[in-house]
Amino acid sequence: MSACIEVKDLTKSFNGRVVVDGITFRVEEGEVFGLLGHNGAGKSTTIDLLLGLKKPDHGTGTVFGLDPATNRKAVFERVGVQLQSSTYQNNIRVDELCKEMSALYEKPEDYHRLLQFFSLENFEKSKVNKLSGGERQRLSVALALINNPEIVFLDELTTGLDTAARREVWRHLRELKKKGTTIFLTTHYMEEAESLCDRIFLIKDGKKITEGTVKDVIENSPYENLEDAYLWYMGEEITR
Amino acid sequence: MKRFLKLYMIEQKLALRSGDMLLFGIAMPVGIMILINMIAGQKQAGEGFTYLESSFASLIAVGICAAAFMGIPLTIADYRDKKILKHFFTTPCSPMWILGCDVLCAGVTALLSAISVALISVVFLGYEMKGNVLIFMGSWMLTLVSMFSIGLFMASLCRTIKSVNAVTSLVYFPMLFLSGATIPYELFPSGLQKVANVLPLTQGIKLMKAVSMGAELENVWKIIVLLVGITVICTLISVKAFRWE
């Protein structure tokens, strides 16, 4: 396997507050990589820096060996992104949104197939803002896949979804993984990380706490499940 | 180009679907046109011109007013808030595409508005332009471009939806009522005319009026220089100050 994402010593501060502090990691092809941390730990900023949406103070982030900030065309034809809590135009219909996103790529995937894959084929003519939370998030993933990407970034995809809707999204992500797509996701649900991720990376206040497979991370803590282990790593008191 | 047009078509559909622009940009000026004509169409508004003639150019500017001071800033602020602009950075396309589409949509709204007002005036109200139609179109275009640059300027300076809403109301309504776009400028007392003269749209309307009536306007060059100046300055500041998120 070879690395398709490489992050070296990424650092960023806003108004004197260090938000991302010397983060280094690699993501291998075909892997599901989870960036875990509390709200405000620096997960979204790490993604922004890595994708070239923000300029790092120092350090580098490369995708396919390229700097996305200066190779936007080459990188983003092959990468799909779903940003945290992004929404869509008022009154836009599912099919219109799919067509709009398809228009941005050289060789877009047939969006009907994607909608079918995500069990959304009956919503083509529905307004996006009339969809349920789960349907909308599945649509978000479908849209992130419209260019048939090799890597997909999903930032807090399932936040705010109920358990059933969340599991439905996971099921689709597992199928995606089977197809060999590399998935980079952030979450603060440990169950999600446990069920999807090959490797996880814990950050707190912008700093690396630990990284490894879910199994390694649990074994290196005094606890038996990821949620307890996570809290222990984060230095929180574990109450029962 | 084909892909840009695809994007534009969808954005245009959305703009028409929302209905705001149809109401404020097209139905309103047409309605006022008919109303003014019923009340005072053939009455003399000033030396040698009727209210119909006077309001023709000003009502054609209402579409520009709605598109520039409501359409553009509200759409951009909304898209920024929804991270739609930011999302474009994660695609091979430039976010300029979506901005371009929305400015184009606003231009089309203003054009549809102008065509509607012109058709109603010429076909049903017997309006005939004394001045040169091509020069009139040029003055319309200059007014449009300069007002749009102000709209972009507003979108750049306001960081939140709330502030954009406040600023659009503060700009749109005075421009609509005090520039002579809806209420004939000739009806204003001279004090109010002085206030109105400060509004950029008043100057655009004055230019269009003068051209439409074929009148010699000694300071027409001053107006042109002013509108070009506004365009250059506002565009430069917008580009400098623009925030994608």
Image (cartoon, rainbow, N blue to C red):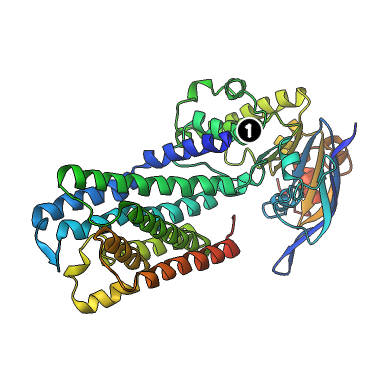
Asked whether, in this view, residue A184 is left or right of residue B93, the answer is right
Give the x, y percent position of residue A41.
72, 54
Quarter of the figure with residue A21: bottom right
Q: Residue sitting at 72 percent across and 26 percent down? A: A176
Mark 1: secondary structure: helix
Query: Could you say which quadrant of the image residue A162 lies in?
Result: top right
Q: Position of residue B156 (x, y in %)?
A: 53, 61
Q: Is residue A128 above or below residue B210?
A: above
Q: Chain of mark 1?
A: A
Three-letter amino acid code of the residue under disc 1: Val
Q: Residue at x 25, y 65 (%)?
A: B215
Identify which residue, A109 or B196, lies in the foreground: B196
Is B98 left or right of A126, judged from the image as shown? Answer: right
Q: Please tell me which residue lies in front, B110 or B13.
A: B110
Q: Is residue B126 left or right of residue A200?
A: left
Count how many numbered circles sit on residues in the image: 1
In this rendering, position of residue A54 left or right of residue A165: right
Residue at left 54%, top 45%?
A: B98
Can residue A8 be seen from the camera position used here? yes
* Residue B117 on image: x %, y %: 25, 48
Q: Is residue B60 above or below residue A219?
A: below
Whether residue A84 is visible: no
Furthest toward the bottom, the residue is: B191
Residue B96 at what x, y percent from top left? Answer: 58, 49
Q: Which residue is mark 1?
A: A141
Which residue occupies 71% across, 39% down?
A76
**Which quadrant does the N terminus of chain A fall into?**
top right
Quadrant into which the C terminus of chain A falls: top right
